Image (cartoon, helix red, strand yellow):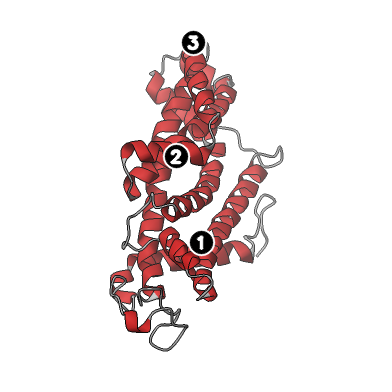
Amino acid sequence: MSRGPGSRAVPAGVWLSAAVLVLLLAAALLAPWLAPHDPLSQDLAHKLQGPSAGHLLGTDRFGRDVLSRLMWGGRNAFGGVAICVAVAVLLGVPWGTAAGFWPRYVGTVLMRISDIMIAFPLLVLAIAITGSLGVGLVTSMVAVGLVLAPGTAQLTRAGVLAVREQDFVASARLSGVWTPILLVRHVLPTALRPVVIQMTIYTGLTFVIQGALAFLGLGPQRPTPSWGSDLNDAYSQILSAPLLILPPGLLLGVVVLCVYRLGDSLRDRMSSELTPGNRKESNVVVA
């Protein structure tokens, strides 16, 4: 079967990355049925044991099954990232849309606010907001979403500024299309392409930040399973059980690499669609 001039085969690495993420997500969602042990059950008589038939990844310093805790911790990891990305999008996209569509006064004020927030180091600002809201999974991820929102707003603004001057937008405005409909139907579908790609970057970054906050004790509170807190526990036992740090560390690294691989593929595909040979003209029907 011949492929069209604009079609591209999806690399095997992309399929592998997607399969790994789907597998990990499924394991997290089905943890109550798939986990071999209770993640909170302690067995001090068998603490810091290596991999065995009863504990495939060994046990931690309290004798808890490492594999079970990683599976349950995935629920917090994926759920926390979803909260963070949702906050960044729900706050950043309207913020950037208003700044880009009305750039003279409204946009100037909104962008100065985003500049002030971006001036602070990301992790430091996230820690400060988490400390103000209170520690926990939801509050920490809302804090990270608030920190990522200004970047989302600036990227959205850039896309809206580029699209608002296009002929089809001007035609719709002259025809009296209601502004919210104009934004939703004609401006945002094109302007948000870079934001979609940026969200994949933010997703991988959020996994890292979430792990760092949990490592510092600002995420899910012990004994709740969490990749970051389990990494902290393993680090505290690195001299007596050095291999214990590998499962949570490698798992976090694999997830981030898979997310970035999917993001790179999405960026390449969108970039190829915007090249002169493959660009499709927008068919706008003005009501």
Q: 60 or 148: nearer the eye?
A: 60
Query: Residue placed at 51% from the left, 44% from the top?
Result: 199
Point 37% across, 83% down: residue: 46
Q: Give the percent coordinates (x, y) of residue 204.
A: 52, 51
In-front residue for pair 258/207: 207
In front: label 1 or label 3:
1
Q: CA distance from mark 1 to mark 2?
A: 20 Å
**Dot 1 and dot 3 residues touching (CB under 8 Å):** no
Relative height, residue 241 to residue 152 (above, below): below
Extreme residue in the top direction: 105
Q: Is residue 285 visible?
A: no
Pick the residue in front: 274 or 139: 139
Going from N to C along the chain, the mark reached first, 2 or 3, is: 3
Query: Which of the 4 image quadrants contains residue 262?
Result: bottom right
- Give the amino acid at mark 3: Tyr
Say which mark, if any, is on residue 252. Answer: 1
Q: Are marks 1 and 2 in contact (CB under 8 Å)?
A: no
Does 114 sit above or below residue 3?
above
Residue at (39, 61) in percent of width and height: 226
